[in-house]
Image (cartoon, rainbow, N blue to C red):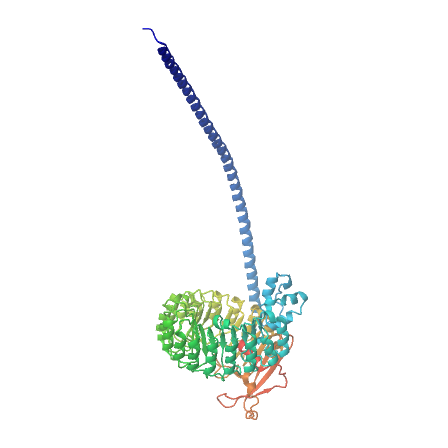
Amino acid sequence: MQPTPEMYQRAYHAYNNKLITMTYRAWFKYHTRKRQKRINLLRKMEEAANYYQTRKIRVHMVKWVQWYRFRKNRHSSAYQIIQTVYNMSLSRMVFEAWHNVMLDARRTREYFERIERGELDGEDYSFYLRGGSRVDISLLPRKVAVKIFSYLNLSDLSQCSLVCRSWNTIIGTSSLWSQVDMSAVKTRVTDRTVGLLLQKCRPYLLHLNLRGCNRLQKASFIAISRCKNLQDLNLSECSGVNDGIMREITEGCHILLYLNISYTNITDATLRSLARSLDDSLRTSSVVADHIGKVIHITSDGYKNIANGCSNIQTLYVNDNNTVRDDSIVALASRCLNLRSVSFLGTPNITDVSVKAIAQHRKLQKIRIEGNNKITDASLKYIGRWCNDLHHVYLVDCPRLTDASLKSIATCRNINIVNFADCIRISDNGVRVLVEGPSGPKIREMNFTNCVRVSDISIMKIMQKCYSLVYGAFCFCEHVTDAGGEMLGNMFSMISLDLSGCSLTDTGLAALGNNVHLRDVTLAECYQITDLGVQKFVQQCRELDRLDVSHCTQLTNGAIKNLAFCCRRLRVLNLAGCVQLNDLSLQYLSGVCHYLMTLDISGCFCVTDRALKFLRKGCKRLKNLTMLYCRGISKQMYQKLAIKIQFVSWSDDPIPPNFGPGFDYLETIHLEQKSSDPETKNNKKTKSKIGVVENQGDGSISAYVLETQILGADNSRHEMSIDTEAALLISPHASGSSLQAAHA
């Protein structure tokens, strides 16, 4: 059978397809092999690159490690060198400081020995004095210079402005004149002074204090009413203030936030004008603080007026006012729902009703009451129940308060200040409950003066719970003994401490010295303290700033010698009634304590003029010197001291039998007010003299000598006449404040 053409065609197509398939497979296999070869090559190239990079990093790492070790060794060597140099420098500085202290101590000892041998003359005193550096304030940055000048009073600023043009420019800064206090120079302030001052600083005056400026008339107060930005105004004790004046001021000063009108001649009309003249915004959103004390013409209607006009009062002071009663305070409290601070010092007619009305609004934070026989434990019960934010409690001389009062406020969580002085019913149980409450660790100030039932048990609880206590006063707590002093010595947060009249001996005083942070210590009338206790105490507390050892009758010159040697930064020292001290004590102080500013040697009748020669040359910073009942000091020396010391008081009377911490031997400065009494001018009984000198700072001296006559055994009436040898250049009010500051 022969193949047909169709068969040849089909055979051809089959053979052709087979060749195509074989060729495609061969090509695909070749292509796959080439692609795999390329992939392998890329993988090998990547591995090679990674290997190269790793190799390069390893080489650089080795080099960097070598460099790092080299630098580390160099740094270590340099650090050792620097450390060696630092240690050598520090050792040199320590050695030099120790050497200087040693030389200083040796010079002091030699100086003391020369004093004791009597080799030093009061006129030859250039041995220990050192000069100080001078700094030109004008070269300091402007803010620093302004800050320095801000600590000066108005009189000092006026004098400094005359030094040079640069000082005058600095003093002209507006921030220095936003607060003006004229109370320090109240005896010399006149209408012309106030007018010129307010003309200069009216746009930026915010705070103005005119307390006690009795020479001001209507012109000054009209000028004050033009100070539209005034926010704080103190007009207390200004005899020229009346209802008309206050109407002018309240109509002009619309943004007053603080107003003190105590001891003025205002009536209810002033309070009506005050409430009417205030802006609506001030009534609803601002704080108004009224000092209303000794204003006998204000009735309950006046308080209602001020409450209606100023419903957002937050601070209220009603001090030394015998006419205020519960109805007035209740009227205020009914409208003033935001009262946070109240003060009723010397306001005896306030009872529990007023305290309840104030406390029920639950916002009271500060309460001050003094000399009130009507306040009972019920008041503290209301406060403890409603006032959880209470942080300041001052309840002095309220004899009806007992331990229940302390238990009532023990639930408050934020109490910082506690003062229950002269509350004689307070005992250890009340103190224990108070300090164990939630406020115990937060209490910073505590005063239990004359709380005779408080003993060492209270001190132990205070030491265990009051970690933040900074100030403590336990005066005349007879049951506080050496054990209490030892526990107080372990309270290292304590800075100021008053243990006057406590049963403290040398052992307790030495243990008290363990607290090296003490700066202010009062040990008046601690009769059992001797030189040994003072020596051990001051050897540990070398940073004392103030010390009161008045009427510690066993102290001698040895105690003052150790005190002067150890506490060279002492600024305030009270030695009144230390009858065994003589000239050596003042010579020790004048040779070392060059920072001394206040000194009281009243009753030290063994001190003579010779010691004051050293004091005048050694204590250049001394500003207050009290020398009452010092018969060994002459009037001539008193007048010499008055030239260099700002406030000096002196008398050569015999020491009164009742002379002690509670004896007001500065009362005679107020006798000038009775000098016009005709019944006392003809009395010729016992005479005494008290001299008072105030250095005005401009080179002039204001002095007067009070010659008093004491009538009867109760010392209730006096007479004052001006000595012909002294000029009366200063008002008795200014000198009285000066003497009181010196005594304090």
- Please state if 233 lies on the left or on the right of 42 as rendered: right
Observer-nearest of 414 and 434: 414
- Please state if 408 lies on the left or on the right of 301 as rendered: left
- Please state if 132 lies on the left or on the right of 561 as rendered: right
Q: Is residue 315 above or below residue 21?
A: below
Q: Quadrant of the N terminus?
A: top left
Question: In the image, what residue occupies the spot 56% across and 56% down?
Answer: 93
Q: Residue 710 location, x and y as percent?
A: 53, 88
Observer-nearest of 225 and 436: 225
Q: Residue 375 location, x and y as percent?
A: 39, 79
- Does residue 621 show up? yes
Observer-nearest of 144 and 642: 144
Residue at the farthest right position: 165
Q: Is residue 664 above or below residue 507?
A: below
Q: Is residue 340 above or below residue 239?
A: above
Q: Residue 207 location, x and y as percent?
A: 56, 72
- Does residue 136 show up? no
Residue at the farthest left position: 1
Among the 4 quarters of the image, the one containing residue 249:
bottom right
Among the 4 quarters of the image, the one containing residue 177:
bottom right
Q: Residue 498 location, x and y as percent?
A: 45, 72
Residue at the farthest top position: 1
